[in-house]
Amino acid sequence: MLIDSHCHLHDREFFSNEEAKSALKKAAATDVTKIICIGTDPDDSEAARLFAEQNSNVFYTYGIHPSECQKFAVEKPAGSAKLVGIGEIGLDYHYSPETREDQIKLFEQLLQLATDKNLPVSFHVREAFDDFFGVIQNFPRIRGVVHSFSDSKKVLKRILNETDFYVGLNGLATYSTLPTPPLEKILLETDAPFLAPTPFRGTKNEPAYIKEIALWLAEHLGTDIVTVSETTSKNVHDLFNI
Ligand SMILES: [Zn+2]
């Protein structure tokens, strides 16, 4: 049993209805039994909710991506048994360093929402870890996963030493030299349609490719895919309660 803990399969900008349906079938046939669709703004989160309510093995999160910080305000997410987290939220100074203050303000509001609702968080952090560590210090009850980690060994160590967060590992790992977190801290994710793993690099990513990432990780760690599947699925269960 494998789980895709972060994808955008509900987003009709990337997947038509038919494509999403066939991707779900392919995922099930590849032993990817659960999928979390991640919201990037209130409308997109609503699309994720509808998609999750139509498909028994799909769950979703409510979030506003830091790049959308000047377009959207925090609203109350619709109540749903399929809502398993808040995200993706965070700070991204790679594309929009000029909106730093607005990003931090929005991030704090969404961390408060996660605290109030007692929901785990999917973090998007890029070139902004100093501010990230500063902000989360004020929210000690927050649990979460640093999605698509792509920073240095030093930053990875800080995450592991200073927080209880999990780290999201995806197709990037299969063709780069990123530091690898310990298996007990890894959540597997595709971030589909982005970041397809080797050997599908350059094509549209989909949840079934979690298998390729798991195979890569098993080989990289010198272990077997059963150990990788069981441990990472348990990690998702412990964080998102699915
Ligand atoms: Zn994403």
Image (spheres, rainbow, N blue to C red):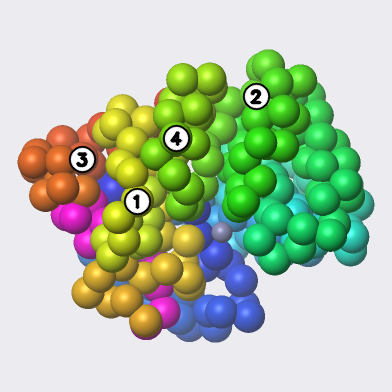
Q: Choose between 4 and 156: the one closer to the eye.
A: 156
Q: Mark 4: give few (<14), some (14-19) or many (20+) Cα within 10 Å.
A: few
Region of the chain picked out in magenta, as a range: 203-216
Identify which residue, 65 or 85, lies in the foreground.
Answer: 65
Task: List the single residue furthest toward the top.
Answer: 140
Whether residue 50 is visible here, answered yes or no, is: no
Tell me the quarter of the picture where residue 186 sits.
top left
Locate ligand 1 by image quadrant.
Answer: bottom right
Residue picked out by circle 3: 228
Identify the residue position indicated by label 4 in the image.
154
Quadrant of the frame with the N terminus: top left
Question: Is the residue marked by circle 3 packed among few (<14), some (14-19), or many (20+) residues within 10 Å?
Answer: many
Residue at disc 2, secondary structure: loop
Upstream in the sequence, badge 4 or badge 3? 4
In space, the residues marked 4 and 3 are separated at their CA atoms by 24 Å
Pointer 2 or 1: first along the chain: 2
Image mark for residue 178: 1
Q: Are marks 2 and 4 in contact (CB under 8 Å)?
A: no
Q: Which residue is mark 2?
A: 142
Labels 3 & 1 near each other (Cβ < 8 A): no
Residue 210 inside the magenta-drawn segment = yes
